[in-house]
Image (tube, grey):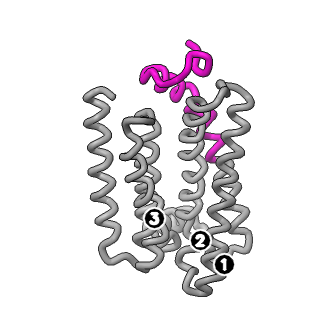
């Protein structure tokens, strides 16, 4: 890891901690805040612990930072009450606050590039159809597990889980969530695959067979 990347990663950590602290100040629902920001609380120490043995590309770290911001903002207001979602709802005369939709789109977009990096570096896969397919499958499996978590929260907490679920009366909310994760995974790979390959080569952590020139 060069000095520029080290300083960038340090800045991202500092900004994440600041955003996490700010999001935890008088959130709309404290339990929902814990549940929504838990991935950040678990992920940040894991990334720090693995920074030497398995450093990720700057592209992945930046995407994870953006995803963290989306989670923390949703945790502070709850996804159904994020102000920017209301602005979009009013501007386009939508029936609901769609910030939750953005969250699930990101849930497919960001993990797709993280998954792609792990598969390229730890398996015999190389860029192409199988990598694209398996990355998409992993993201959909992750999305399904998250929906199981929401289902479990609903069973255990009953009506108290409404703020966490953010279904806003949509009986097809689960299907929409997984569909948007799928769209996010496909879009991430279509838009960022070549850039991701370049980042892997520049960092000299991509096997030659996986990321040829």
Are circles 1 and 3 on residues that touch, CB within 8 Å?
A: no
Residue to which mark 2 is pinned: 96
Q: State left or right for residue 4 relative to residue 160.
A: left
Residue to which mark 3 is pinned: 38
Residue 26 to residue 15: above or below = below
What range of the chain is rendered magenta?
A: 184-213
**Separation of disc 2 and disc 3 at Cα?**
25 Å
**Separation of disc 1 and disc 3 at Cα?**
25 Å
- Could you tell me which secondary element the residue under label 1 belongs to? loop
- Could you tell me which secondary element the residue under label 3 belongs to? helix
Q: Residue furthest top?
A: 213
- Count numbered badges in the picture: 3
Q: Earlier in the sequence, mark 1 or mark 2?
A: 2
Q: Is residue 189 magenta?
A: yes
Task: Give residue 14's position: percent from left, percent from top.
Answer: 27, 51
In the picture, which quadrant includes the N terminus? top left
């Amino acid at each position: 890891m060069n000095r520029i990347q080290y300083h960038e990663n340090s800045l991202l950590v500092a900004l994440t901690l600041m955003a996490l602290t700010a999001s935890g100040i008088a959130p709309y629902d404290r339990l929902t805040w814990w549940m929504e920001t838990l991935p950040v609380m678990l992920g940040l120490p894991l990334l720090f612990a693995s920074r030497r043995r398995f450093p990720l590309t700057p592209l992945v770290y930046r995407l994870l930072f953006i995803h963290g911001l989306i989670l923390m903002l949703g945790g502070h207001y709850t996804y159904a009450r994020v102000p920017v979602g209301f602005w979009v709802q009013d501007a386009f005369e939508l029936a609901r606050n769609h910030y939750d939709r953005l969250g699930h789109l990101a849930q497919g977009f960001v993990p797709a590039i993280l998954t792609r990096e792990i598969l390229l570096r730890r398996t015999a896969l190389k860029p192409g159809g199988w990598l694209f397919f398996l990355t998409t499958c992993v993201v959909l499996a992750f999305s399904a597990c998250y929906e199981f978590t929401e289902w479990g929260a609903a069973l255990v907490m009953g009506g108290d889980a409404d703020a966490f679920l953010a279904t806003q009366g949509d009986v097809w909310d689960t299907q929409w969530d997984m569909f948007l994760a799928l769209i996010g995974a496909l879009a991430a790979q279509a838009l960022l695959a070549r850039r991701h390959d370049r980042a892997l080569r520049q960092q000299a952590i991509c096997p030659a067979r996986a990321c040829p020139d």
